Image (cartoon, rainbow, N blue to C red):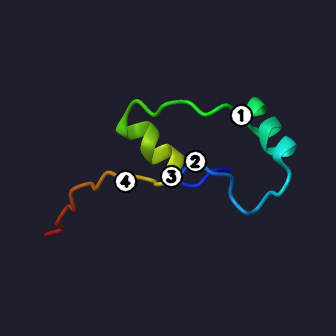
Amino acid sequence: MTNKTGKMTSGSRSYSAYLELLKTFPPRPISSEEELLATRGVKTFQLLPVSSSS
């Protein structure tokens, strides 16, 4: 994995394993807000109006 500077994170010390990871899961550009939220694991919810019981 990479951090914001594009350098390898300290979680993996093997450069070859890092390259294999990149080959298996190549990075791709994020082209929409929906894709950005999906990569962050953010779930959005739509609020429904509350019905008042009279």
Identify the amino acid type marked 2.
Gly
Q: Position of residue 7 (x, y in %)?
A: 63, 51
- Between label 4 and label 1, give the one nearer the viewer: 1
Identify the amino acid type marked 3.
Arg
- Between label 2 and label 1, give the one nearer the viewer: 2
Question: Quick one: which residue is furthest to the left in this view?
Answer: 54
Q: Which callout, 2 or 1, points at the residue further toward the start of the chain?
A: 2
Identify the amino acid type marked 4.
Phe
Crowd rating for badge 2 (residues with CA inside 10 Å; few <14, some 14–19, many 20+): few
Which SS class for mark 1?
loop
Residue identifier under label 4: 45
User: Marks 2 and 1, Cα distance to the nearest angstrom?
Assistant: 16 Å
At horizontal 77% and vertical 32% (from top left) the residue drawn is 24
When the figure is inspected, residue 9 is found, relative to residue 52, above or below; the finding is above
Which SS class for mark 3?
helix
At horizontal 82% and vertical 36% (from top left) the residue drawn is 20
Pointers 1 and 3 in contact (CB under 8 A)? no
- Residue sitting nearer the eye, 17 or 5: 5
- Residue sitting nearer the eye, 37 or 28: 28
